[in-house]
Amino acid sequence: NAGVMQNPRHLVRRRGQEARLRCSPMKGHSHVYWYRQLPEEGLKFMVYLQKENIIDESGMPKERFSAEFPKEGPSILRIQQVVRGDSAAYFCASSPRPATSYNEQFFGPGTRLTVL
Amino acid sequence: KQEVTQIPAALSVPEGENLVLNCSFTDSAIYNLQWFRQDPGKGLTSLLLIQSSQREQTSGRLNASLDKSSGRSTLYIAASQPGDSATYLCAGHRDDKIIFGKGTRLHILP
């Protein structure tokens, strides 16, 4: 049973380009979470999605960032017009059930985004 | 405002010693507490998850405790080994998200 998969593992973009990060949850998991780890910072929650629905986007920057989790295919975190401050590691996690009092999230290996 | 705080930020100890990593949290809405390990440039490995109704969890040389009344958790590592060198993250579960501390960078000296 493969774990959470993220690709690409490393992504380099120039300022102003778009970055697309993909996350395939564990088999049977329909709940996906995205976190961002800035250099020398802890991981910060960005967004929680269920299939075709955004449940909680309280951690998403107001502009340039969007996320989706379509009925078929991986979840996508999209960053438009990237800036140097977007350089970070982006982690995806999945869970088999909704966020409840026992919510173990399984983390992927992360995508390291570098903006030149 | 840092909701989950880890002390110390970095720690070096000789191989074979027992050690304790500390975590404190200010949000009473945090219910479960989880410890992760992160190696440089790598993802997260879950070590121990303590549910709100529990006080501690053990796995091999690792023992984690949780005191919700004081907002504290500790991770105890017995008989440390060079392979234990990594960053250890404390994380509290609140609603649908996990709140992470900045981590303690542990270096075990051979």
Image (tube, helix red, strand yellow):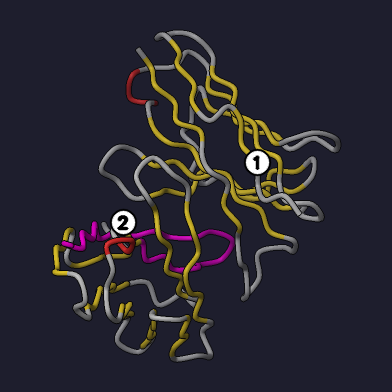
Residue A5 disc label = 1
For the point 48% across and 13% down, the residue is A81
Residue A23 in the magenta stretch? The answer is no
Residue B98 in the magenta stretch? The answer is yes
Mark 2 and mark 1, same subunit? no
Q: Please give the chain letter of the residue carrying mark 1.
A: A
The outermost residue toward the front is: B110
Q: Where is residue B103 shown, x and y percent of the image?
A: 29, 58
| Residue stretch rendered in magenta on the structure | B89-110
Number of marks in picture: 2
For the point 53% across and 30% down, the residue is A9
| In the displayed structure image, the side of residue B41 where residue A9 appears, left or right | right
Q: Nearer the viewer, residue A63 or A91?
A: A91
Q: Please give the chain letter of the residue carrying mark 2.
A: B
Majority secondary structure in the magenta region: strand
| In the displayed structure image, the side of residue B28 where residue A98 appears, left or right | right
Q: CA distance from mark 2 to mark 1?
A: 22 Å
Residue B87 disc label = 2
Please tell me whether residue B9 is drawn above or below residue A23 in the rendered image. below
Please tell me whether residue A5 is drawn above or below residue A88 in the rendered image. below
For the point 31% across and 56% down, the residue is B86
Quadrant assignment, res B12: bottom left
Q: Where is residue A94 shown, x and y percent of the image?
A: 66, 53
Disc 2 residue type (three-letter): Thr
